[in-house]
Image: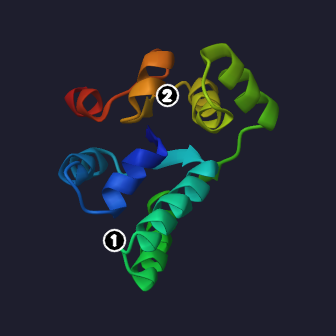
Amino acid sequence: MVLVDTNILAYLMIEGDRTAAVRRLRSRDPDWRSEAFIMIELSNVLATYVRARALERDRAFRLLAEAEAVIPALVTVPHWRALEAAAEYGISAYDGRFIALAIQSRHRVVTEDTRLLAAAPRWTTSLADALRA
């Protein structure tokens, strides 16, 4: 099982410089899990791409549907756990949701968010480190 942050899912869905590495991670273990908030954040990323005219609207909807298939079993952590993680690690409540899930599942979150990696190193790992493991 691989626990992923929004940026990892976005790199998989939107072709870019990290897409090949994320595909390697997925090929090693296709059982991806995440907090349900990931779809809200991914929707926001896609909306931003559409507003910037970097992605067509219909393509954004297709990518969102594909993303839902990539992580079919989303977990919702209690709000108080997300707040607890946010307070403990000095991070946003949004990121707190992913850290709370990591603590609950005892798996590190794969992320490229450098601030989150620095704030919660016990519960996070970079894409490069996940591929080396």
Left or right of residue 51: residue 100: right
Give the CA separation, mark 2 to mark 1: 34 Å
Note whether 71 is above or below 129 in the view shown.
below
Q: Nearer the viewer, mark 2 or mark 1?
A: 1
**Which quadrant does the N terminus fall into?**
top left
**Which quadrant does the C terminus fall into?**
top left
Q: Amino acid at mark 2?
A: His
The reply to whether residue 113 is visible in this rendering is yes
Note whether 44 is above or below 27 in the view shown.
below
The reply to whether residue 72 is visible in this rendering is no
Q: Which residue is located at x 44 percent, y 78 percent?
A: 62
Q: Which residue is located at x 30 percent, y 50 percent?
A: 26
- Which numbered marker is on residue 25? none
Identify the residue under disc 2.
107
Note whether 76 is above or below 64 in the view shown.
above
- Which numbered marker is on residue 54? 1
SS for dot 1: loop
Residue 99 percent location from the top left of the image? 58, 28
Q: Amino acid at mark 1?
A: Ala
Q: How is the image coloured?
A: rainbow
Of label 2 and label 1, which has the lower sequence position?
1
For the residue pair 60 and 110, the one nearer the viewer reads as 60
Query: Which quadrant of the structure image shows residue 97?
Result: top right
Furthest residue toward front = 52
How packed mark 1 is, by other alpha carbons closer than 10 Å (few <14, some 14-19, many 20 or more), is few
Query: Which quadrant of the structure image shows residue 40?
Result: bottom right
Q: Which residue is located at x 32 percent, y 63 percent?
A: 14
Residue 121 percent location from the top left of the image? 44, 16
For the residue pair 82 and 77, the one nearer the viewer reads as 82
State if disc 1 and disc 2 touch (CB < 8 Å): no
How packed mark 2 is, by other alpha carbons closer than 10 Å (few <14, some 14-19, many 20 or more), is some
